[in-house]
Image (cartoon, rainbow, N blue to C red):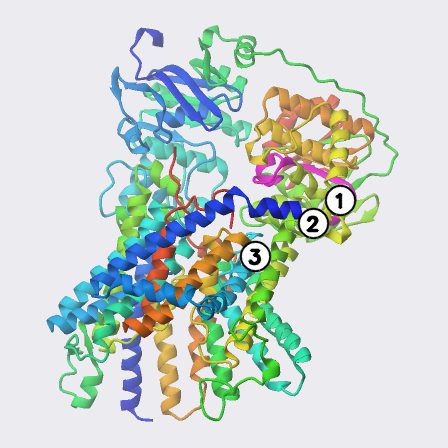
Amino acid sequence: MNLLSILGVFSSAIFSGTSLLYTTLGEVIGERSGIVNLGLEGVLLVSASSGFAVTVITGNPYIGVLVAVIIGGLMNMILGYLIIHRKANQLASGLALMFFGFGLSALIGKSYVGAKINALPRIALPGLENLPKLYSSLLSFDILIYTAIPVAFLVWWLLFRTRWGLGLRAVGENADTAYASGRDPRLIRYQALFLNGLLAGLGAAHLSIAYTMTWTEYMTAGRGFIAVALVIFSRWHPLRAIVGALLFSGAVAFQLLLQSSGVQVSPFLLDTIPYVLTVLVLIAWGGNRRHSAPASLGRVYHGTE
Amino acid sequence: MSARTFLRIAVSNTLVKNIARYVMMMLLALLLFGIILLATGKDPFQSYRDMFGATFGSAYGFSEVLVAMIPMLITALAVALPSRVGLINVGGEGQLYIGAAFATWGALTFKDQPAWVLLPLMALLGMIGGALWAFIPGYLKSIGLVNETITTLLMNSIAPKIVGFLIFGFWHSPMDTVKTENFVSAARLPTFFNTRVHLGFVIALVLLALFWIIMKYTRWGLEMRAIGGNPQAARRNGIPLKGYLIVIMCLGGAIAGLAGMSHVSGFYGVLILNFSMGLGFMGFLICWLAGGDPIGIFLMSFVVAIITTGGNFLQLTQGLPYAVINILLALALFVVLASPKFFEGKKA
Amino acid sequence: MPNPQDRSPMISLRGITKSFPGVLANDHIDLDIFSSEIHALLGENGAGKSTLMKILFGFYRADAGEIRLSGKPISIRSPRDARSARIGMVFQDLNLIPAFTVAENIALFLPNLKVVLNPQEIDNRINEISKQYGLAVNPRALVSQLSIGEQQKVEILKLLLSDARLLILDEPTRVLAPHEVEALFGVLDNLRKDGYAIVLITHKMKEVLQCADRITVLRSGRVAGTLLRSEATEEKLVKLMFEKALSGLKITESKRDESSKPILELRGIETRAEGAGVTLKGIDLQVRSGEIVGVAGVSGNGQKELCDVVLGMTTCVRGEKYLFEQNLTNRSVGAMRRKGVGFIPENPLAMASIPFMTVLENMALPHTWRYARYGGFAIDWKSLKEDIQKTEKQLGFSVNFYAIAKSLSGGNLQRMVILREMTHDPHLIIASYLTRGLDMQSAIAARQALIQARERGAGILFISEDLEELFMLSDRLLVLYGGRFVGEFKPSETNIYEVGHLMTGSKVEHVG
């Protein structure tokens, strides 16, 4: 094994982890407001397919990213209507949204399977432009990768250092108290879900427009559920979500490394690592109040009479 | 159950109302999906004629609806039972995979046995598999460590990969690495009247009836409803909370495992990589929309089965990807979810 | 102080009416609230006090009526409207977010909070006000780590910092020790001097006479009368609060036999605290046949843990528990129940009943094994009904078997639990805050039931924080403080002050 293959593994791990980080950050915001979004898988698919389709049509990846982001937000508004307005069960509504996403993305993407696009341009790490092309191409990343970690800090700042974030977290802990403080828990939950959708859309855009540069049915392969798991793993904290996404990337990288070095380990078993680790982490932290979920996570806000 | 109570249920007002509401809900969903079809340049009337012609137009088509209902009925029950003690089992999908894997091991290992030995053995193995998979979240919940919603959800993502590992590593047929050899005929659940409706349908109905009777008439039903209604009060009244939580969670898992066994033995006759594609999640949705009520589960499964079966024909005639039928399915679910008073007074 | 009647009111309520399904909670209520005044809202549970104030705070919306601020009609549709009218409220069950720090909880209610938070500035503002009124708290502490008394300080600070001029406190003393009550009244007095208007919701007459300037008594959703403190006497207030004359309690002589073997015996019990709970240390206790053992203490000093240990809900890490000289340490609740242990908790809806089940189904729960037939496939409802009816005759009250538990009033629910627990003549009864939240009539019925059980020869562990009640009923009195018994008396050999001091830890003596 040489430096080149290690670099290659490193590079592909970063690419595969980025969409996950954005999605996880979005879900952190949603869950901090008290909403579990099991429909993320569907949201990702619809965003990825529509963003990809628009990129094919316009030839401009930036417009594609923009559309994917907006579609992500809109998809979550369906969920918002069901669980905030109609007070439906969160888990069931999320799963229904997932099935909706399966169908809609298949319909949108049908004509674009195998299409070629102008992907998001890749920019080499500054200072590494002079390396041999083979190396520098492995170390060039698109803009969404460079912004991923700053976005995590931005989400942290929004949640913990702004008035809006304080209100949002209050809604997730006790919607009645938030209401008593003069806030509208419904509006805040809509806002949180919209942001959740925007960030998921960004993650999906990265997946189809920057990383794989293709559209195939069910291309997200469970990323929505991994994101939900990583939110728990990161204990509802945006900065720990970076660690979570790195963990997933690490598992992917580890798998690739093993393969390239000829070690035979079933890729199926390696795929379970993030989930098994999350379960173990949950057990290790279980019962400790400081690590617990937002208190009204999953609860319907009924309002007052 | 006496004949009189049965009659009372059959003509009960709520049943008629329920059916009327299911019809309304279907019409609204069909209308919305029609608009989408129209937008993509398809003729919705032709599509619907194909769908309903295929499902209601022939005895075989209708039997296919019943076939599709089988795993939905059983996985919905795997959610309904734990929900009565307040457990939210989102893990039907994973339990179904593990149950299918255990049953498959039986089918491949004891293939020389006659059907009357092999089938009960496979069913038992499937139930053990599902129960083991559900034991972990059930145990963690009962000692107050981790919420079962989260663990069952996570374990859904692990189970198919373990099945993949088993198929790919040990069980795959010489021809194909993504599935096992076909089961011997002794390992197949018998089918009826030259259709694909298999014994699983009868099993599902018996289980639903049993569930209803146990919840309504027995001591265990009373105690389970008490736990579901107020776990702390139930415990103070001397009902063994921990024991119930673990046992009921495992039973839920066992039922989902049986669904897996019935699906590989009755429907496929072979274990295929990723064969479920959301059956367990569908069961969760159906149970939740039906408010955990056995009759509701039956009606809801029927509606969903019409949609998914009809979707098969839509694919043939309209040149749309099969996945598109999920839109109609989801629209129907949205309509039900948006009317929260659908099953008023019943707690899932 | 000027007579408030000479001034125009700060807030006026006129004709406030509010109904909930089945209940008319407020029926054309008129109320005036003045600045620089403590106004007590007195009434039984369910008289409509909290509902009225939640309407004023915008938490509920009135069906009819008008609210005037300095004479001008205003519309209060939500707490946001109330806050802009400078009205603040502390709810009965405190509404702080345990996962937040003190500062975050307070910041949530700051009216001029900046878009970007400045933690240092918020801390400074908290410290400034908390010094001014002697409400010391650490802004950076997590609320989940604070005691109830400290949490209440945070609630009051929150109101002050939110710029409220009218402070509504819903039963603020319910969870406080006597000396904490004193401190609270001191704070309220200072606030009154600074011009705040304060509404104190309570059902404790003594407190009202101690600190209120004006007293409005509510009875079944209507104003029964408003008095100045100078005109008010305990007698007058009782008359306003209760329509009917109260039937008295018949206390019979205890048939306690000192030499008999104890029914329940705890030897050196020690537990490990769960979460915010209390650790029991070295608990020795004997309950004999035909006696009521009273346990006094401010709630949160180990009462819940004591009940749970006796009932078998929690495991003890050290010590032994004997029932009829049989070692039952760490056996299940079911095992204890079968040996004849009854339990009447302070909150019958949350701790003893299943809200959506019928009364009869609820009655079956502790005895499912007794009424199961065909190995559990059927339940013998008929003999259950017969047994309960027997108890109804004994105790002299009854409940509707087919009502849904949730639809019962607090008093009826407690009756249901008492009937259930007294059926099959339990040998040991644990009664915890038996009368908390009950109206007078129900409280008398509940106490009478205990006395009857004692007559029959049952042993009773009676936990309460109402000293009057404890002195009236107990044959022996123990004081629980910080998870230990710190005193044991015969009620005739002590007085309320001695016990009160022990309860608050100001004079700690370890027993035995």
Q: At which x and y percent is residue C149?
A: 48, 35
Asked whether the residues under marks 3 and 2 belong to the same chain, the reply is: yes
For the magenta stretch, what is the residue range? C334-359
Q: At which x and y percent is residue A256?
A: 36, 85
Q: Secondary structure at mark 2?
A: helix
State the image quarter where residue A238 is shown.
Answer: bottom left
The answer to whether C421 is drawn above or below residue B251 in the figure is above
Q: Secondary structure at mark 1?
A: helix
Q: Name the chain letter of the residue that bears numbered label 1.
A: C
Q: Residue at x 18, y 63 (%)?
A: A67
Q: Name the chain letter of the residue that bears numbered label 2.
A: B
Q: At which x and y percent is residue B200?
A: 57, 69
Q: Residue at x 65, y 57 (%)?
A: B243
Confirm whether residue B320 shows in the render. no
- Using residue A253 as the reference point, say whether residue B92 is left or right of it: right
Q: Are marks 1 and 3 in contact (CB under 8 Å)?
A: no
**Residue C254 or residue A228, whichever sits in front:** A228
Q: CA distance from mark 1 to mark 3?
A: 25 Å
Q: Are marks 2 and 1 in contact (CB under 8 Å)?
A: yes
Pointer 3 local density, CA inside 10 Å: few below 14, some 14–19, many at least 20: many
Q: At which x and y percent is residue B145?
A: 54, 59
- Using residue C242 as the reference point, say whether residue A219 is left or right of it: left
Residue located farthest toward the right when viewing the structure as drawn: C259
The answer to whether C59 is drawn above or below residue B107 in the figure is above
Residue type at tag 3:
Pro
Residue C457 is inside the magenta segment: no
Q: Residue at x 74, y 43 (%)?
A: C380
Q: Which residue position is annotated with label 3?
A: B82
Q: Which residue position is annotated with label 2?
A: B219
Residue type at tag 2:
Arg
Tell me, for residue C371, which label it has, or none: 1
